[in-house]
């Protein structure tokens, strides 16, 4: 005893900054008051060895909980997470090591999720507007007052026409419960307008459904065995990290990697070859590859004969696209197209990781149809490491019970109009008409920030600024959209509520258990819509279902015991699902000529020299707006540690375009169109190809230098298929701010 007491002063300096020590799995986790997270992990042979080294008695280990969680964000990875909690505080977030797609790693953004949950600017109480719309001035009110006033306003509008009420939501959470469960029940019972949720992926999704019969594809883990990987319209280092680790494994084993992207992204830097085509010309490239495969004998004739429907028409279309024609349209070297075609015909297994960037142009749907046919032509589907992955979400159709969760029967025979979320700027400014329906009088926004993320944001902001528009926003922070709300209701984060997730990047169901109690007065979306339903007098029993009941209703055919035990379960699917055909089309074959659509062809951009020569003469630069590496849409923009990494809004511009305009790196520039003006800093670099500028997004408007973001420049015209936005189909001009002034 005396030895230990005498040793204490010598040990005290070494541990003065330690708040507490957690023993778990043979490791000491030392937590400091300065950061509230792991400062060091010291391997211990046996519990108490660290104290023995200091000559102290081992303290009693405090209670620690480990909770299964899931990343909620709009990312194909849908990571399984293990959350460690002590005394109501998050002390560690890490990827589940046993979950094959996650394999223990989290991206930079989500590893800071605790910082986001405990952000000092988080909305923790209901707020009522006190200033002009957009000013972000509010007073705190109680839940009872807020819900009563909201219900009174909605009831009055619904009495005139419930279609004048519009829900607006997307993928702020991808969870089945906190997304469209109780919310969908509420709006179906009300008879509100439907929302066509198009803003991200519907062009590509519709194209897959036309070609394959559903949004289905490869298993992401099998890319490790591929010998050729085409990373097309994607920057996985920034937006699909776990796929990238599989691609890296394949590369180390000898696979060749191509990146097809207008931008020389971080991913392009790491691939063997980069093909920097013009934005929106992917369909022309796919047709040229088909031309080469046909001309050089690169087809798998047996697979085509048995598993492709309508090949003769496709053959005729492809032969009209020799390499030189496509190279001129795409702005690339013909030799590069030939090299790519040769690799695709000769290296097996060959896999395509297609992502949604390339479908955000007028011809996006047609381009995805063409690219999706490429693995059918060479028989790549015969191998489990061959084929294509754009979305895996269609694999979950047999287990998702959306009708039970969302209850469309509550419409009771009504057929409300549908509002496309991508045209919300125009739609909010429309008067009522027989063709459009009633003027929009109320918006309820959840899981989205449309003032920042919807196209042509000047019109979106003008619509939200209408004094006669009643707006309710469920949020974590005072975003650009929340600043325009009449009421802001505090919503829980993923660490505070129950949810369950499917994925569009892998084939696992992932469970999210609440790890901590809701901060302040925050409530889950499900509970907010339950309470609104009660205020409106909706007595239907389904509004009494708690979240555990919703969880059981959301899925069918799932081993819930295994889901609870592991935090995830894998769908029982074959490794090579289309090795013998069997696509989920009526004929079981991949389809070329879809009813009402015909054979896919290259479709030029809305805004390009071919389709709009006068516009191109005034605005000669094409602009794309890929996400900044440390943001996910607009979700993490207000996390200071991430915003500090990004610095400020940037426009990447190639030296050959910057020089004649008097632009150097660091120059404050005006990027402009007829639709508006966006101010940011120029980064003169070769990440941009000549003739194309990259406006990295999506910053909140109010954090932009002039109160705008890159969506000031985008337009509301839609894709050829899926009625999706065309964010990357945009012509602009750029000049230094001094010249603009």
Image (cartoon, rainbow, N blue to C red):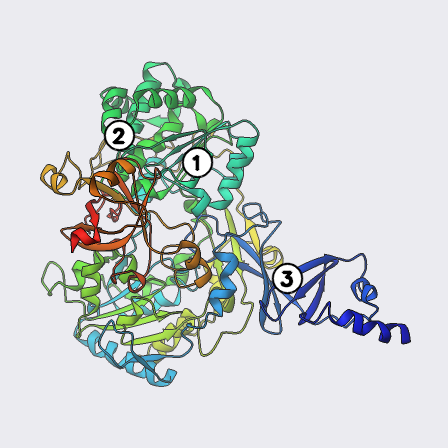
Q: Earlier in the sequence, mark 3 or mark 1?
A: 3
Q: Is residue 227 left or right of residue 738?
A: right
**Labels 3 and 1 touching (C-beta < 8 A):** no
The answer to which of 276 and 492 lies nearer the viewer is: 276
Q: Residue at x 23, y 58 (%)?
A: 457
Report crowding for label 2: few under 14, some 14 to 19, many 20 or more residues within 10 A (C-alpha). Answer: many
- In percent of width and height, residue 172 lies at 39, 60
Label 3: state its secondary structure: strand
The answer to which of 5 and 156 lies nearer the viewer is: 5
**Labels 1 and 2 touching (C-beta < 8 A):** no
- In percent of width and height, residue 704 lies at 29, 60
Extreme residue toward the right, this view = 2
**Labels 2 and 3 touching (C-beta < 8 A):** no
Disc number placed over residue 39 in the picture, else none: 3
Disc number placed over residue 330 in the picture, else none: 2
Q: Earlier in the sequence, mark 1 or mark 2?
A: 1
Q: Is residue 602 above or below residue 130?
A: above
Q: Is residue 629 above or below residue 291?
A: below
- In percent of width and height, residue 46 lies at 81, 59
Label 1: state its secondary structure: helix
Quadrant in the picture for the N terminus: bottom right
- Whole-number angstrom distance, CA of label 1 to CA of label 2: 20 Å
Label 2: state its secondary structure: helix
Between disc 2 and disc 3, the foreground one is 3
The residue at which mark 1 appears reads as 269
């Amino acid at each position: 005893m005396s030895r230990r007491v005498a040793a204490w002063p010598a040990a005290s300096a070494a541990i003065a900054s330690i708040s507490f020590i957690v023993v778990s799995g043979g490791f000491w986790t030392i937590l400091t008051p300065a950061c509230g997270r792991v400062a060091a992990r010291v391997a211990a042979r046996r519990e108490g060895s660290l104290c023995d080294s200091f000559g102290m008695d081992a303290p009693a280990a405090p209670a620690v909980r480990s909770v299964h969680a899931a990343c909620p964000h709009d990312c194909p990875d849908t990571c399984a997470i293990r959350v460690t909690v002590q005394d109501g505080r998050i002390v560690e977030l890490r990827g589940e090591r046993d979950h094959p797609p996650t394999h223990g790693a989290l991206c930079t953004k989500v590893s800071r999720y605790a910082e986001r949950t405990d952000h000092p600017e988080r909305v923790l109480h209901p707020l009522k507007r006190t200033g002009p719309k957009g000013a972000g001035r509010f007073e705190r009110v109680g839940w009872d007052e807020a819900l009563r006033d909201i219900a009174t306003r909605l009831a009055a509008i619904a009495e005139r026409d419930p279609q004048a009420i519009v829900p607006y939501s997307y993928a702020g959470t991808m969870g089945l419960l906190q997304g469209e469960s109780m919310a969908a029940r509420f709006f179906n019972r009300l008879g509100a307008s439907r929302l066509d949720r198009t803003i991200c992926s519907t062009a590509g999704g519709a194209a897959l459904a036309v070609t394959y019969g559903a949004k289905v594809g490869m298993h992401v883990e099998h890319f490790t065995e591929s010998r050729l990987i085409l990373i097309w319209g994607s920057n996985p280092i920034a937006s699909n990290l776990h796929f990238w680790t599989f691609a890296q494994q394949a590369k180390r084993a000898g696979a060749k990697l191509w990146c097809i992207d207008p931008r020389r992204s971080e991913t392009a830097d790491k691939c063997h070859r980069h093909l920097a085509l013009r934005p929106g010309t992917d369909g022309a490239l796919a047709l040229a590859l088909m031309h080469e495969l046909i001309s050089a004998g690169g087809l798998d004739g047996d697979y085509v004969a048995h598993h492709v429907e309508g090949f003769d028409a496709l053959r005729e279309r492809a032969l009209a696209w020799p390499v030189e024609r496509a190279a001129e349209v795409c702005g690339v070297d013909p030799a590069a197209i030939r090299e790519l075609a040769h690799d695709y015909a000769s290296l097996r297994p060959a896999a395509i990781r297609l992502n949604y960037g390339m479908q955000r142009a007028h011809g996006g749907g047609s381009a995805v149809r063409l690219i999706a046919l490429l693995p059918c032509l060479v028989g790549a589907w015969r191998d489990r490491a061959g084929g294509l992955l754009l979305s895996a979400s269609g694999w979950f159709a047999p287990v998702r019970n959306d009708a039970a969760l969302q209850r469309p029967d509550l419409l009771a025979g009504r057929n409300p109009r549908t509002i496309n979320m991508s045209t919300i700027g125009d739609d909010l400014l429309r008067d009522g008409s027989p063709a459009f329906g009633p003027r929009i009088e109320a918006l309820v926004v959840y899981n989205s920030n449309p003032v920042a993320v919807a196209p042509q944001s000047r019109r979106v902001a003008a619509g939200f600024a209408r004094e006669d528009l009643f707006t309710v926003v469920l949020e974590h922070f005072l975003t650009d959209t929340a600043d325009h709300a009449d009421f802001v209701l505090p919503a829980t984060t993923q660490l505070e509520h129950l949810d369950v997730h499917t994925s569009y990047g892998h084939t696992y169901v992932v469970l999210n258990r609440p790890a901590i109690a809701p901060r302040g007065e925050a409530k889950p979306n499900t509970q907010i819509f339950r309470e609104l339903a009660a205020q409106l007098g909706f007595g239907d029993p389904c509004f009494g279902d708690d979240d555990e009941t919703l969880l059981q209703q959301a899925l069918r055919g799932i081993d819930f015991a295994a889901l609870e035990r592991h935090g995830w379960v894998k769908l029982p699917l074959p490794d090579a699902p289309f090795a013998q055909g069997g696509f989920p089309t009526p004929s079981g074959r991949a389809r070329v000529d879809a009813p009402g659509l015909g054979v896919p062809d290259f479709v030029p951009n809305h805004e390009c020299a071919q389709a709009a020569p006068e516009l191109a003469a005034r605005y000669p630069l094409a602009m794309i707006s890929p996400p900044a590496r440390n943001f996910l849409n607009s979700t993490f923009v207000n996390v200071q540690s991430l915003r500090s990494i990004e610095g400020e809004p940037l426009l990447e511009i190639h030296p050959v375009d910057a020089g004649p305009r008097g632009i150097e790196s660091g120059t404050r520039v005006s990027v402009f169109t007829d639709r508006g003006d966006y101010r940011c800093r120029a980064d003169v670099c070769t990440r941009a190809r000549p003739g194309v500028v990259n406006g990295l997004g999506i910053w909140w408007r109010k954090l932009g230098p002039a109160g705008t973001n890159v969506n000031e420049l985008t337009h509301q015209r839609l894709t050829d298929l899926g009625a999706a936005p065309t964010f990357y189909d945009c012509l602009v001009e750029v000049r230094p701010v001094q010249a603009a002034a």
